Image (tube, helix red, strand yellow):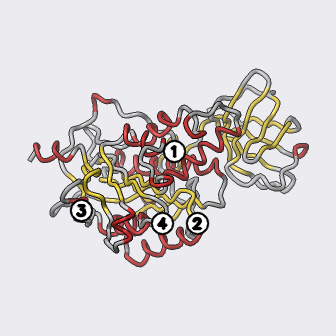
Amino acid sequence: MKADLYAAGNATRLDGPLLFLERSLDVGLNEAVEVSGADGRPRLGRVAALDDDFMTIEVLETTQGLALNETRVRFRGAPLHFSLGPDLLGRVYDGVGRVIDGGPPIAAEQHLRIEGLALNPARRASPADFIETGISSIDIMDSLVRGQKLPIFSGGGLPHDSIAIQIARQARLRGNTDERFSIVFAGIGIPHDTAEQFRTAMERSGVLGHTALFLNLASDSSVQRLLTPRFALTAAEYLAYELGHHVLVILTDLTNYCEALREVSASHGEIPSRKGYPGYMYSDLATLYERAGIVEGRSGSLTQIPILSMPSDDISHPIPDLTGYITEGQIVLDRNLHRRGLYPPVKVLPSLSRLMKAVSYTH
């Protein structure tokens, strides 16, 4: 790892979470930085764009109080990493992996890049079992298979938060087993009251003991929203592939993630695609979803339940549309069922799990 570099006096513009600098140093794309102003408080960030003359820094915290002539940037010489250790469960983190429950920092044993590593398709193991969610409409008709990515398509006002909490409280491995099971739960761009609801539900039910809870608030930087699922998935990969746990990752709400992606893309001046979202949103979502799986030779597994709220209940909207191409099925919530007081309001016909047959054939 190369030594830290510093830049001062070359900031040219500040646009929301983006800081533009004249390029005076040899730095790399996605390199981690610390941005500080007259108050001396470091703000985490990363290099988002480079050319011969300028560089763009994404600041992951508030830029309030930063003055261009007093801004100083420290380049860390490496991409963003997450420091992890066996005691990461039972803790509450913010959107960029910092402990916010009042306890001590995590005793780190490994420092892993938050982008993760793509699974080699040749090393992916076939599905062999499923995870019980405690929700009969899912367990019986659309089973959640270990290593699968099975999204929930919801809508504004539908009880996807309650379903997420219920799954986190009730999920378990099938049958009597000594295998270790843990949960990584990430709230993305959520209001304060929803974050408190998640935290309280986990603590009161005792689930927090085997859960790592990440909370990114709606008031946090939109750039930070893009990193929250990556920090959560890095923690899950460590638990699954280093410690041998079977890990269930619940991500809610991926629509907030995509809205932040659109906002940051527009700030970069990129040409928009469908409904203003960037043309690379498909590949960007794939970098999250494809981190689920089972690796041959490793005892653990990583299973995902991403939750997204469909704008105007439109299942053809780019967010659910692209998600459906990447994932192995979907659970669809229905507004009419919800109005009739049915819970959970799972619409049976469009809901499916493409790996359920694969599991039944193996037993």
Mark pair 2, 1: CA separation: 30 Å
Mark pair 3, 4: CA separation: 20 Å
- Answer with mark 1 or mark 4, whichever residue precedes in sequence: 1
Disc 2: CA contacts within 10 A as few (<14), some (14-19) or many (>=20) = some
Q: Which residue is mark 4?
A: 157
Tell which tag, 2 or 1, sits nearer the viewer: 2
Horizontal relation, residue 42 to residue 176: left or right: right
- Answer with mark 2 or mark 4, whichever residue precedes in sequence: 4
Q: Which residue is mark 3?
A: 137
Amino acid type of the residue tagged 2 in the rendering: Pro
Task: For mark 1, give the secondary structure.
Answer: strand
Measured as percent of width and height from the top left, residue 318 is found at: 48, 41
Measured as percent of width and height from the top left, residue 265 is found at: 64, 38
Mark pair 2, 4: CA separation: 14 Å
Q: Which residue is mark 1?
A: 111
Residue 61 sits above or below residue 213 on the image: above
Tell which tag, 2 or 3, sits nearer the viewer: 3
- Answer with mark 1 or mark 3, whichever residue precedes in sequence: 1
Mark pair 1, 3: CA separation: 40 Å
Tell which tag, 3 or 4, sits nearer the viewer: 4
| Residue nearer the viewer, 78 or 68 | 68
Amino acid type of the residue tagged 4 in the rendering: Gly
